[in-house]
Image (cartoon, grey):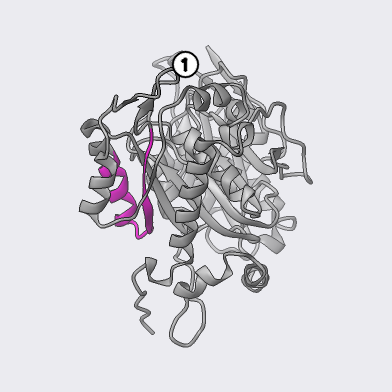
């Protein structure tokens, strides 16, 4: 069985990515990473140094005779260094045991983009939230090594959960819409490669348009900019990808999409605490993370793991949302605590993080989500929309609170 994905305009994924689930013949030669590194050492890198001995080359991924990796280059030299990419691709493809090589250039941040980003931040409603990110001298501390950069995006907020099925994607979509309703420029990235939900939730279909040779325009829905792997594959197509390919796709959906100027980019994280989640937490400059859980103990156990993952990589936890908190019978108005109640609030107090709010379990939230018109849009003056607006306001208070994060210690 072959799973093919056409992604025009996104570097490595602009080629046909094909995984063959049939095992290769036992007698076939399989290339090793060391052989690939040896070939890269002989390539004229045109001033980049020894490709194989630098951090410019990403992890090398080998699957069924296909080799994937990227080379990080200065953004202003990407066009000039295209021959380096081509030479690396051809050299690796010529190795015994390699059927195809896909090599991409990943643009490093331009030196001037900090100043440009800073200028945009000063005009952003969240500009003052950056106060906590300055040193005593008033200068912004250097970005952690290896962090991606999204010039024009003021804050990136992850919406995460320790497990699936707790309503994380529905929460992310409605929070993004609540931010927009509050007058902010908002985008949402569906980072769940294996189970993308945003195309259905936001009622958006069709493939993104190209913006230049290697960039895509996000789809737009209800005033939000939206990107998801679901726009690039059929809804029922399984993504049979290993970790490195998932990480590559996520990186490119951040870097190679024309997000423009945003006050907030909401990232609907994959559920759990695996490799993709950890990489996103480490590589993306997150302003903070929101943890979504249901009230029962089993869900809270996993929510605790997700929260601790963000803490370990120094991402501020903005708070916990208790989803499906209670059920009000539409005919009688009687309240039922189907999954228990108050567990997430008690957990937030125990862990010393803000409790952002509780979302009821209602039929209209489910129905509007399935219909591609989330409740904040479908019933903007209703009780559920008011709940999401309150949670969004609590998140903004955390982002704007200089005390929300511990002070950084800068070693000269």
Q: Residue at x 43, y 86 (%)?
A: 136
- The answer to which of 132 and 36 lies nearer the viewer is 132
Does the magenta run of residues contain 281?
Answer: no
Locate the C terminus and report the quarter of the image it occupies.
bottom left
Question: From this viewpoint, which residue is outermost toward the front?
Answer: 332
- The answer to which of 74 and 377 lies nearer the viewer is 377
In the rendered image, residue 342, in percent from the top left (x then y), is placed at 26, 40
- The answer to which of 6 and 323 lies nearer the viewer is 323
- The answer to which of 41 and 53 lies nearer the viewer is 53
Residue under pointer 1? 21
Give the vertical position of 5 relative to 107 (above or below).
above
- In the rendered structure, the answer to whether residue 46 lies left or right of residue 271 reads right
In the rendered image, residue 314, in percent from the top left (x then y), is placed at 35, 60
- In the rendered structure, the answer to whether residue 376 lies left or right of residue 343 reads right
- In the rendered structure, the answer to whether residue 261 lies left or right of residue 409 reads right
Magenta stretch in the rendered image: 303-323
């Amino acid at each position: 069985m072959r799973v093919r994905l056409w992604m025009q305009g996104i570097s490595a994924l602009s080629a046909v990515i094909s995984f063959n689930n049939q095992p290769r013949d036992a007698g076939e030669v399989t290339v090793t990473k060391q052989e690939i590194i040896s070939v890269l050492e002989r390539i004229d890198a045109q001033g980049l140094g020894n490709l194989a001995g630098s951090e410019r080359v990403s992890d090398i991924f080998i699957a069924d005779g296909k080799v994937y990796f990227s080379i990080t280059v200065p953004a202003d030299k990407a066009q000039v260094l295209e021959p380096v990419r081509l030479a690396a691709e051809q050299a690796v493809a010529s190795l015994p045991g390699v059927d195809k090589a896909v090599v991409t250039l990943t643009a490093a941040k331009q030196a001037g983009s900090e100043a440009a980003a800073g200028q945009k931040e000063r005009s952003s409603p969240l500009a003052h939230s950056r106060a906590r990110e300055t040193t005593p001298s008033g200068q912004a501390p250097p970005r952690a090594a290896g962090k991606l950069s999204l010039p024009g995006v003021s804050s990136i907020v992850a919406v995460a959960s320790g497990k699936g099925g707790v309503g994380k994607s529905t929460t992310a979509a409605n929070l993004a819409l609540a931010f927009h309703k509050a007058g902010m420029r908002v985008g949402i990235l569906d980072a769940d490669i294996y189970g993308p939900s945003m195309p259905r939730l936001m009622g958006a279909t069709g493939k993104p348009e190209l913006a230049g040779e290697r960039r895509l325009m996000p789809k737009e829905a209800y005033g939000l900019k939206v990107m998801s792997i679901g726009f690039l594959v059929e809804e029922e197509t399984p993504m049979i990808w290993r970790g490195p390919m998932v990480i590559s796709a996520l990186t490119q959906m951040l870097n190679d999409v024309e997000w423009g100027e945003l006050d907030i980019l909401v990232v609907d994280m994959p559920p759990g605490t695996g490799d993709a989640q950890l990489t996103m937490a480490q590589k993306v400059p997150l302003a903070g993370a929101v943890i979504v859980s249901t009230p029962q103990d089993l869900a809270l156990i996993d929510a605790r793991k997700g929260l601790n993952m963000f803490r370990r990589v120094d991402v501020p936890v903005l708070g916990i949302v208790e989803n499906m908190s209670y059920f009000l019978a539409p005919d009688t108005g009687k309240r039922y605590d189907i999954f228990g109640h108050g567990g997430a609030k008690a957990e937030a107090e125990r862990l010393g993080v803000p409790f952002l709010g509780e979302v009821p379990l209602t039929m209209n939230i489910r129905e509007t989500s399935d219909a591609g018109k989330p409740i904040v849009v479908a019933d903007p003056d209703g009780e559920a929309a008011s709940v999401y607006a309150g949670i969004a306001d609590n998140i903004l208070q955390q982002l704007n609170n200089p005390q929300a994060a511990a002070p950084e210690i800068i070693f000269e």
